[in-house]
Amino acid sequence: MRISTLFFLFFTFTLSAQKVLLPNHNIADCSGAVELQNVGNFNSEFTGDKGRLKDFFAYSYLPNFKETNSLFFKFTAPRNGKLSLAAKISTGKFDLIVLKSISGNIVDDIYYGRATIEKSTKSPVSEILIPKDSIASKDTISINLKSDDIVMMVFNTEKGLKEFLNFSITFEISDEFENPDKFKKVIDERKNGLAATMEIQIRDAETGLPVISNVNIKDKKKSNLYKGSDLIFSTEKMNLLTIKCDATGYFFSEETFKVYPDSSKIIKIQLQSLSKGKKLKIDKLQFIKGTDQIFPGTESNLIGVKDFLLLNAEIKIEVQGHVNNEGENDMSSKSLSRKRARKVRNFFKACGVNGKRLTVKAFSNKFPIYPNPKNEKESQANRRVEIKIL
């Protein structure tokens, strides 16, 4: 009885101690898992270590599994369907465990041992294939999920190995619940022909041509996943929507829009092609005037860029810092712009991005968005960090 009590107290203390460290955005820890907004092909890189937390402390019964060098990926089922996964590593082997949440908070469920283990490799492998009728079931991963089910995919390899992991996930909608024709170029989800409409048009920023993109639309209650270039919906109530678009060969886009029931709205989203020399401004990231301190609450806007980098491990970037000194480009301005760029670079490194992929450049106030800012909003826009593909 005393041993059980002591174990329980130790277990509770260890979990509490770990929670003090949160939030932690490192991909090698459960709390830093990359959220896979869409299905597709990805290329990530092992960091070489197991992160800061003992993520599987509550799963001591797992046979032959010891977290040494891990990557965490979170996926939420957009509808009822089947999730399948393929993965490959060039050097060495890896283990894979797929866990499902029971409470809606997958991180806490794993920390407290509540998450159920849905699939796992029986022994380390170098490759997992997408299940097909012609392929044996050994070392294949396929899971039936219900709408809004949350799963965590955990890859683990030997300590110190900084190797690329190429993986892909597919999600097959159950015919019982969905019509596969919805995944055409044009998706029309209008339910009321008399209601106002919202139309989302996804276009190439340079050519203006339609781009078929993975689209994740979130409101306060849920998120929905689509694939198309033009999406049409009825707007029967006021809503605040976050729309994320991710297409192969383009920078991701994430914007927030308000829609109203009494007026139709066309939302045009322009995607920048992903090629050397292209730049991406980290929208809504703000710095406190005269410092490299990120304005509280706006650091969350780095998460999407962090996920983008962790899922595209072949890309190298230059982190560019800018200030708002209204024409001045002295040494202090350059130093401040460098500190801001380093602050962002260090955030990415702390999340598991290989530092060799990240360089820093200070531009002082050479390239302001607003050369003569008229208000604080325009001044804040000049205090920014951009990334450039190298």
Image (spheres, rainbow, N blue to C red):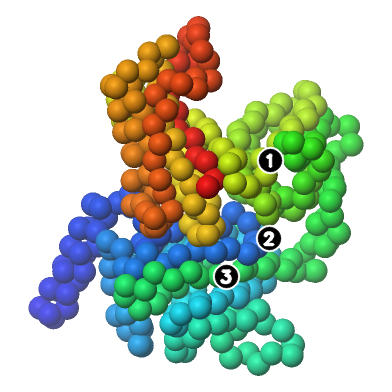
Of residues 270 and 9, the one nearer the viewer is: 270
Q: Residue at x 54, y 45 (%)?
A: 389
Left or right: 342, with 210 as reference point: left
Q: Residue at x 51, y 13 (%)?
A: 371
The residue beneath circle 2 is 79
The residue beneath circle 3 is 167
The mark lying in front, picked from 2 and 1, is 1
Of residues 30 and 5, the one nearer the viewer is: 30
Dot 1 falls on a residue whose secondary structure is strand
Query: Between disc 1 and disc 3, whose residue precedes?
Result: 3
Q: Residue at x 49, y 35 (%)?
A: 386
Q: Amino acid at mark 2?
A: Arg
The relative height of residue 326 versus residue 147 in the rendered view (above or below) is above
Query: Between disc 2 and disc 3, whose residue precedes?
Result: 2
Q: Amino acid at mark 3?
A: Phe
Which residue appears farthest toward the left when viewing the image? 2
Left or right: 148, with 344 as reference point: right
The relative height of residue 120 versus residue 342 in the rendered view (above or below) is below
The mark lying in front, picked from 2 and 3, is 3
Q: Where in the figure is residue 307, as x and y percent of width and height?
A: 50, 52
The span from disc 1 to disc 3 (Cα, nearest Å) is 24 Å
Left or right: 91, with 144 as reference point: left
Q: Where in the figure is residue 204, as x and y percent of width and height?
A: 75, 40
Dot 2 falls on a residue whose secondary structure is loop
The span from disc 2 to disc 1 (Cα, nearest Å) is 26 Å
Q: Where in the figure is residue 358, as x and y percent of width and height?
A: 41, 49
> Counting other residues with Cα less than 10 Å from the Cα at mark 3, is it few (<14), some (14-19), or many (20 or more)?
some
Is residue 49 visible to the viewer in this orientation of the structure? yes
Dot 3 falls on a residue whose secondary structure is strand
Labels in figure, total: 3
Is residue 294 visible to the viewer in this orientation of the structure? no
